[in-house]
Amino acid sequence: MSGGPSKPKSAGVRLIQIAVLVSLFAMLFAATRLIPETHGHVSAIAGLGFLLLAGTLTSELLEILKLPHLTGYLFAGVIAGPHVLNLVDHHAVDDLSQINALALALIAFAGGAELEIETIRANFKSLGWAMFFQCVGGTILVAAVFVAARPLITFVQSMSWSAVIGVAIMWGALAVSRSPSALLGILSQTKAKGPVATFSLAFVMSSDVVVLVMLALILTLIKPLIDPSATIAAHTLEELWNEILGSIAIGTTLGLILTAYLRLIGRELVMVLVLLGFGFTAVLKYLHFDPLLTFLTAGFVVRNLSNQGPALLHAIERTSGVVYVVFFALAGAHLDIPLLKKLWPAAVVLAVSRAVFTWGLARVASALANDSPEVRNWGWSSLVSQAGLTLGMSVVIAKQFPSFGDSFRSLVIAVVAMNEVVGPILFKYALDKNGESRKEEPTRQSLVSLVNAEERVSVHSPSHHG
Amino acid sequence: MGLLVLAYIGSLLVSGRTLRGIGLPSGSEYLLAGVVIGPLGLEVIRKETLLEMEPVVSVMIGWLALVQGLGFGHNGAQRASARSVLRGSSVALITMVTIAAIVYGALRVFRLAPEESQRIIALGTGVACTETTRRAIRWVVERHGAAGPISSLVADLADNDHLLPMVAIAIVFALPSPLNTVEISPLPIWAQLISNFILALVLAVAAHALLSREFRIDESWGVMLGIAVMGIGVSLRLQLSTLTVMFTTGVLLSALSKHRDDILAMISSTENAVLLPVLLVAGAMVPTQPTTLVIVVAALALTARISAKLMTGVLLRTLDKRLSQAAPHWGLSLMPSGSVAVCVGLCCAYRFGPNFGEAILVASISVNILGELLGPVALKNTLVKGGETTS
């Protein structure tokens, strides 16, 4: 059976992979053209299988270019998605989006289970400075660029200056959110070990919690800037506090229960994770708690309060690989290409400025924290990626500000799409350059490997969501 | 969510136990549990929910068919001989034709169904009620510690008789019918039939190509899941027989791949987890107010199956010396049916809708329950008489 690193693939193997990929495309193409309309969830079933296979094969073929597997999954989804070949149509993409709940749960579990108290303690100074500069400095600087780029952003051109500033601050808060899924996907593929990997993991997993809280606060505080009749509601802050506290409490309880289960039964872990991912997520949402924070806490508890962390991580790896291929392929299918074409000037300006500020602020923070040269040079590379968390936040904003929310979300989608593609490539490059990626190929996880998903990349096209 | 919980329970509680003589041999208890929780019983699951479950259940059934296909033609690591396959298929053919003929005759004579649907109901019932489940045979053999030529023969027959129903169901689905709950396929019948096998071939070759290098569990899971789900989805879209496509894929992959044993060991571990919810759903689909057609078809199927198995028993006793000591009615040992029968019945229920589709499903369930009652006892007696067990 399996064991040890896989051998490098020959040209013959690559040719076989291409042949199989073409056959799969042809099969689904023929099926969709022969029977264009289907009832129920038939197209979703075929789409699911196709994305799983095509995503894997594409990622393996892109290995030749040393691109991360994640990029392959995205690419496969884009090609198969509604805007290119339409092998996986809008309905199928929507149907399959339910998998994102499972993906999010697994990401959060894995993220929490990867975090060790000792690591956080050892890197506390570094993390603290980075958090301050990236979250505060990043928000301000990106917001400033947003204001400056006003001529390129149509939906703010008719707003008052106070409203523009309010929107800009919201944009700034979104800009400092990261992508644990992309991070953990790359780490899983490369099996990277080293200062950059350690710093990135600790920072990204903890910063998202900070950003979630920050955004909620900002949304409450800037409302009067955008809507002069609005007031700052104290109960909103109280609800936020309850949500955070409750999520942590439930997550802690879940973590303890999981620990007991792992210890006493320890079987059917894959099924348990799937049940938690689908069922428990729905329960948490119904009770207005945050699934990401809950599962993150649960994973953290299992890792740090018991010795069952490796067992949990192993179960997550077994489950997540397949889930995350579909997760990122769906993200690719969701990418709104026409929208990107329309918004690219503003999106490029905002994406590039965000990346530059991220780099600059990371250098400053690292200098103050006296980080190692590796972290100083490359610690920023994992911070460029953005994915589902950012998009999820944009949905919240769109609902709170319906007058410009859809346009705002469209711009977010465009920028996130760029960061989603560029970020993982950058991070993998950094790990390779820094010598933290393992020289030998990791254990065959091309399909399974995308451990740690995190955010749900719910790149919905505005027109489709209406 | 309910299906996931059932799958979890199935995997946790049932794994391997039936083969150690615990639990009923054909899984009838889960069918009956489904009846209890379904609309006919406590209505824990409503009819609308059962219909909404169709996509997920279709995937589960397709997966089971794939597992069956991978295991077909093998007895453990040993490949079955062509003679065994031919013998098993012949027994299945006799059973299928007998049941189909009797049901068709009754439908025509008593006009219990529209003319255009009689063939489908008859053939569908025949296909659904053909199988002898190897689980039950092994259950009896292991429980009583039996060993000998009769045990081997009966196990061999059970191992090799589900090729025919898995293929024949494609004919049932290809026949034009107003019963279909899906849109009429644009493909002619012959094209539909061939498409089943072409699709299976493409899937099997693709899977073989992707798994031909060193076998790695994690990678292989993704390939098998992707191949299975895509195959099921495409077959559903083209209105082909998912059972036929996935079973054939399994058979072809088993023939092509050098990692067949590893693949089978990997995916067969999920069989119980998937089978349990399928059996429960099948039981829950039993109609609350069965029509005359449903009752008559079930009764005819039971009668015909008993006749067919007895006939088969007499025929084999004449042709095979190993059965010379067996009683004339030893053919009842072949009565137990299992997952193949239920899957066929459930597919037909979803495909052909209430009344007609349910008639086939109820027939398959009835045959399963009757087989549970008669089969193990008859087999045990046959083995005792043949001196292969004393208990």
Image (cartoon, coloured by chain):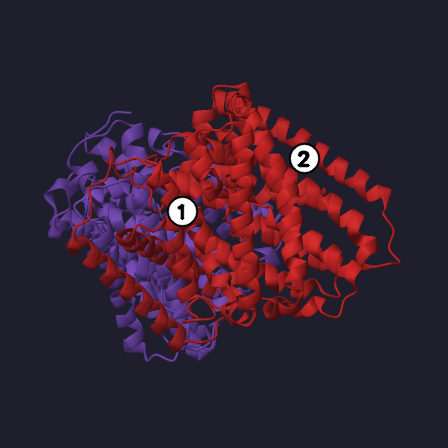
Q: Quadrant of the C terminus of chain B?
A: top left
Q: Chain of mark 1?
A: A
Chain letter, red in picture: A
Residue A322: give its label. 1
Chain letter, purple in picture: B
Residue B237 location, x and y as percent?
A: 41, 68
Along the horizontal axis of the image, is A339 left or right of B27?
Answer: right
Residue A371 location, x and y as percent?
A: 48, 29
What residue is at 35 percent from the left and 58 percent from the top?
A54
Residue A151: give its label. none
Q: Residues within 10 Å of mark 2 (few under 14, many from 20)?
A: many
Q: Are marks 2 and 1 in contact (CB under 8 Å)?
A: no
Q: Secondary structure at mark 2?
A: helix
Residue A247: give its label. 2
B115 versus B96 height, above or below? below
Tell me the CA gap for discs 2 and 1: 27 Å
What residue is at 79 percent from the left and 47 percent from the top?
A221
**Which quarter of the figure has residue B380?**
top left
Number of dots carrying numbers: 2
Choose between B349 and A420: the one closer to the eye: A420
Q: Secondary structure at mark 1?
A: helix
Along the horizontal axis of the image, is A217 left or right of B361?
Answer: right
Q: Chain of mark 2?
A: A
Along the horizontal axis of the image, is A152 left or right of B216?
Answer: right
Mark 2 residue type: Ser
